C-alpha cells in the first residue's frame, strides 16, 4: 500500500481516491519532538479513543473524517486536504496560555477561548491571528469564524461526555481539512491532544509524559480514560 506520509505518531496510507488509512504508532513525543519514547499499546488506545469520539461527534451532527476501523490501531478516513493549523479550545487555563499571558493556572473561561497555531515544529507552533491566516492562505476570516463555531460545538459534545465519564475537559486541539469546499474535522481526538483531569486535579493526559511520569503511568491513565468513556458512550 502506498505510504503518503508519516508524522510523529501516525502513518498515512492511500486506500483509494477518496480514503486513506491512519495508522496510530506506539510513539509518544513532547516538546515539538524533543522528547520521544515508544509506549507499547498506546497506538491502539489513541485509535480507539479517537474512533469513539469521532463517532459521537458524527451522531451530534459534526462532520468528521472518520469512516471506520481497518484494524484496532488503524482508522479508515476520508482523504482531506489538511490545513496546517492547530485549533485549540480552552475551558480551563493551563499549558502555553498561562506562560504567554497574565492568566493564572486553573482560571475558568466562560465562554471558552479559541486560539490558532501554525503547525510548524521548527518555529514551535507560533500563535496566528486572522491576518496571518489570510496572508499565509490557511483560513479566510470567514473560514476561521466557521472553525471557531465548530470548535465550540465539539466542546459542547466532548465536555459533556468527559463529565459523564467522571472527568473535566480542560482543553483540546483540533485539525481541519478541506473536501469539496467543506471544512471537515480530521486528525485525532485522544489524550495526546486533550487535557483531561479528574475532579481532584489528577492528570490523565499527555501532561503526565511531558512532566516525566513513568511510561506505565501514562499508559494506565490512557487506558483508564478509554474504559470510562466506553461505559458512557
Ligand atoms: O500547549 P498548549 O497549552 O497550547 O496546548 C493546548 C492543547 O492542545 C492541549 O490539549 C495540548 O495537548 C494540545 N496540543 C496538541 N498538539 C500541539 C500543541 C498542543 O495536541 N502541537
Image (cartoon, helix red, strand yellow):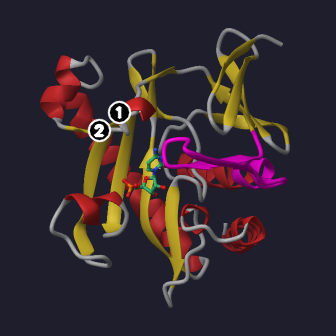
Residue 101: percent from left, percent from top: 18, 62
Q: Are marks 1 and 2 in contact (CB under 8 Å)?
A: yes
Q: Is residue 21 left or right of residue 209?
A: right
Q: Residue at x 77, y 46 (%)?
A: 26
Badge 1 density bin: few <14, some 14–19, many ≥20, Cα 10 Å = few
Q: Is residue 17 left or right of residue 202?
A: right
Badge 2 density bin: few <14, some 14–19, many ≥20, Cα 10 Å = some
Range drawn in magenta? 25-47
Q: Is residue 198 left or right of residue 134?
A: right
Q: Nearer the viewer, mark 1 or mark 2?
A: 1
Please name the residue that numbered disc 1 is placed on. Answer: 123
Residue 196: percent from left, percent from top: 52, 70
Is 6 placed above or below 66 here? above
Which of 123/78 is in front?
Answer: 123
Q: Residue at x 15, y 68 (%)?
A: 102
Residue 127: percent from left, percent from top: 25, 41
Amino acid at each position: 500500500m502506498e505510504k503518503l506520509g508519516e508524522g510523529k505518531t501516525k502513518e498515512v496510507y492511500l486506500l483509494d481516491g477518496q480514503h486513506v488509512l491512519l495508522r496510530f504508532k506506539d510513539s509518544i513525543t513532547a516538546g515539538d519532538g524533543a522528547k520521544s519514547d515508544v509506549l507499547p499499546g498506546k497506538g491502539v488506545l489513541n485509535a480507539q479513543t479517537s474512533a469513539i469520539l469521532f463517532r459521537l461527534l458524527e451522531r451530534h451532527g459534526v462532520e468528521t473524517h472518520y469512516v471506520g476501523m481497518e484494524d484496532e490501531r488503524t482508522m479508515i478516513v476520508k482523504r482531506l486536504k489538511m490545513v496546517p493549523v492547530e485549533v485549540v479550545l480552552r475551558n480551563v487555563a493551563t499549558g502555553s496560555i498561562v506562560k504567554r499571558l497574565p492568566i493564572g493556572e486553573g482560571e475558568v473561561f466562560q465562554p471558552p477561548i479559541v486560539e490558532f497555531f501554525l503547525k510548524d515544529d521548527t518555529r514551535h507552533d507560533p500563535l496566528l491571528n486572522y491576518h496571518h491566516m489570510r496572508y499565509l492562505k490557511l483560513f479566510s476570516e470567514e473560514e476561521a469564524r466557521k472553525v471557531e463555531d465548530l470548535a465550540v460545538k465539539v466542546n459542547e459534545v466532548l465536555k459533556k461526555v468527559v463529565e459523564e465519564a467522571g472527568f473535566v475537559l480542560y482543553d483540546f486541539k483540533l485539525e481541519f481539512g478541506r473536501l469539496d469546499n467543506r471544512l471537515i474535522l480530521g486528525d485525532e481526538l485522544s489524550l495526546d491532544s486533550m487535557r483531561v483531569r479528574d475532579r481532584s486535579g489528577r492528570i490523565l493526559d499527555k501532561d503526565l509524559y511531558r512532566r516525566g511520569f513513568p511510561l506505565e503511568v501514562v499508559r494506565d491513565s490512557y487506558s483508564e480514560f478509554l474504559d470510562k468513556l466506553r461505559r458512557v458512550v
